[in-house]
Amino acid sequence: MSQSKWSDQKNIPRGSSYDARWEQLASSGENVHGEADFISQLNPSSVLDAGCGTGRVAIELVRRGIDSVGVDLDPEMLQAARRKAPTLEWVEADLQKFTLERRFDVAVLAGNVMIFVLPGSEERVVEQITQHLCEGGLFVSGFTLDTDGIHLDEYDETMQRLGLLSAGRWSTWQKDPFTGGKYAVSAHRKI
């Protein structure tokens, strides 16, 4: 039985092949660090990069002086992260049931993580990640809305049920206002 919808994806690039897309975008002059820019503006001292993939966000945050830990289920993605940044902490674990012995100022789910978790597990994922946030910490997630994944109203209801208060919503990591559309970046505060 798969542990995520990501695990079921067979024809998508992983590891170094996945990184090649971002490297190509960066070499063409694109800013591939919108998520890190967004998170850096929050001035956290620590970040949990949940669903970190090959570590693009965590590595950039550490480069900016922000203590970051990456957690991901995919060993091939983590292998690429470890190759690029062997001194960072990379944890192979299911977001539904991981435990770290620390708390973070911010948890970020950057790469459509919420649409790749198993349907029906979203609340467990949010709850598990929230347990790793400091009081007052922010849970920040960006994901595509036009998929068969969690809908924004369900997401908001889940956050509210778990005691997380809305702290803003945007249509991009560059903080463009959210007026509907196909993508949302949402911040919720743990109280």
Image: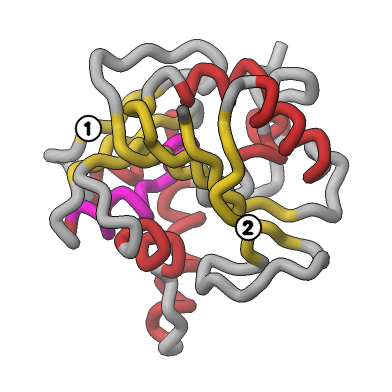
Residue at x 44% of width, y 47% of height: 15
Q: Does residue 66 lie above or below 24 as drawn?
A: above
Contact between labelled residues 1 and 2, with CB atoms less than 8 Å apart:
no
Q: Residues within 10 Å of mark 1 (few under 14, many from 20)?
A: some
Report whether 72 appears left or right of 67: right
Residue 52 colored magenta?
A: yes
Report the span colored magenta.
Answer: 49-62
Observer-side mark, 2 or 1, equals: 2
Mark 2 or mark 1: name the one nearer the start of the chain: 1
Q: Secondary structure at mark 2?
A: strand
What colour-coding does the image apply?
secondary structure
Residue 8 location, quadrant: top right
Residue 65 location, quadrant: bottom left
Residue at x 69% of width, y 21% of height: 161
**Type of residue at label 1?**
Glu
**Type of residue at label 2?**
Arg
Give me the C-alpha separation between circle 2 and circle 1.
29 Å
- Give the x, y percent position of residue 5: 71, 31
Q: Which residue is mark 1?
A: 89
- Give the x, y percent position of residue 63: 17, 59
Residue at x 38% of width, y 36% of height: 137
Q: Using the rendered image of the protein, determine whether residue 78 is visible from the camera's viewpoint.
A: no
Q: Nearer the viewer, residue 171 or 1?
A: 171
Q: Which mark is residue 169?
A: 2
The residue positioned farthest toward the bottom in the image shown = 29
